[in-house]
Image (tube, rainbow, N blue to C red):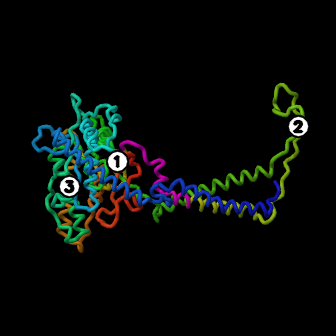
Amino acid sequence: MRALRPQRFLWVLLFAALFPLALYSLLGTALQDTKYSYFYRRNITALQRAEVLREQQADAYLSALKYVRTTHNETAKVLNAPHHHHPDPPDLCFVVLSGVARPQRYVVQTVAFLLARVMGDVMPEMDREVREKMGGAAAVSTSLKSAKPPLVAMGTTPPRLPRVRTWIHNSVGTNDHLGIIPSLVDIYAATPRISLEADSSRGWYEKAIWDYAEALDVAMTEKCGLTVLLEDDGIVASGVVRHVFEGMRPLMSTDADKKDECGWVFVKLFYTEFWTGWQSSVADIATLAICGVAAGLGVVKIANRCYARTITTPRRKSSLFAPHRDDSPYLPAPTTSTTPPRRRRPPSLPLTPPTLLSLLLFAYTTALVILTLHAIGRQNVTALWNRRPGLTRTTALASTVAHVYPTNPTTTSCAARNTRDLIIYLNQKATYFADHGAEETPVVPVDILVDTYVSDNRKTKWELRPHLVQHVGVHSSTRHKNQGNFDIVKISSTYADGTTFI
């Protein structure tokens, strides 16, 4: 190999300078719509339009449902309300937790999307009638839904449709923020608790604990087989009833492992990777360093091998009679003469000695890999192997946007005992925080308390992917911010459904 001349060395330097720029330009184009990456750019205008469209869809669906129910079919009220004296307990209950009258009308959007999804699964004919009443883009064909196999409740003989109930657990003190929802869905008035005006932050956390425990207790009283507790700023996906029943089957089956059957507390229908990015922790720093060093060593190893081959390559003279293949059976054996390997002179300046060159290449590759991984985002890197669909155990934080709990104490399933114990635990904690002021002990949010209960009692928590609920709030109580998928909002990256069209 000829010595690398100064002109070629300058080309190498130019490539080393331009390659990162080209790489980051490519990543910027590919990842500009990818959450949690450095290159993510939110389109505020599009988010605001989606918000307006979602509100219009919600109002239209609720108005059409009210018209259809009052004029044609009273069974919609049976579907969407708990009946304390009904002889048959519901198989699945959806409870929307409404704790504050937000100006963004989150609860209207949540309830409208929920009713549309439930009706589409359990009462598709009525759902079609409602959509025809809405007209326009909302009149979506339900042929795909009708092509699916009939929805059947678990463990029923003979097979039947699941009994589904929906209600609002309202702790606001008034129904004014609910609009026409009370005419469609039963409203459970929560027990009055601490006023938010007394201490907005602490009072809110205490009240949320009381509400969560009370909502679970009401579901236990209703003897709901499974209960989905849904915060009032979450949008559910299409086919939510079907997916919950099918996804929960491994835990509810009589063939389930006894430890799994009795040991689980809740199943997450939502989780955000917002909290799982690169942090200034020993583990993350070590991970980035190991990845960078491994890549650097690998590139240096490959470069050294290539360099060694170029300076020891033998020369071979091919025979005139075997121009294509030396081992051809139809041609005379080639006459070749091999000259000894000719060792080339080491490159002259301005190239530095090979050892220093290897160190520079190692440092360059290591830094480039670390910066690239950091820019892509830890959430997107780990997503390559950490998003297996289906029901799986999870170590993720509770994040109580949407949970499924076993809430029928009369069944043979022993998991409902965990729900009863959790209710007692939350009530005890809420009482303790109310009796002790902020000076004595800080209040703990309800989702962290649920996590603490699981870990202290060595129970398990599960997650159903793809997620069936998407969070649509930014800061739910901040008036001047439009809701949407902003950088700071907690949203799921595995939610496969849309949040714009109902």
Is residue 131 magenta-colored?
no
Question: Which kind of residue does numbered mark 3 sit on?
Answer: Gly
Q: Is residue 306 left or right of residue 418?
A: right
Which image quadrant is residue 90 in? top left
The residue nearer to you, when weighing 228 against 75, is 75
- The label number, if any, that marks residue 501 in the structure image: 1
Locate residue 184, reporting x and y percent: 18, 47
* Cα gap from disc 3 to disc 2, whole angstroms: 93 Å
- Vertical position of residue 138 compared to residue 146: above or below: below
Question: Which kind of residue does numbered mark 1 sit on?
Answer: Phe
Numbered range of the magenta stretch: 371-391
Q: Is residue 108 left or right of residue 72?
A: right
* Cα gap from disc 1 to disc 2, whole angstroms: 75 Å
Locate residue 221, reporting x and y percent: 14, 47
Residue at (81%, 47%) from the top-left corner? Answer: 313
Quarter of the image with the N terminus in it: bottom right
Q: Furthest residue to the bottom?
A: 439
* Cα gap from disc 3 to disc 1, whole angstroms: 20 Å
**Is the residue marked by circle 1 packed among few (<14), some (14-19), or many (20+) residues within 10 Å?**
some
Residue 63 visible (yes or no): yes
Q: Furthest residue to the left?
A: 85
Q: Which residue in the structure is indicated by mark 2? A: 336
First in residue order: circle 3 vs circle 2: 3
Is residue 378 magenta-colored?
yes
Q: Furthest residue to the front?
A: 136
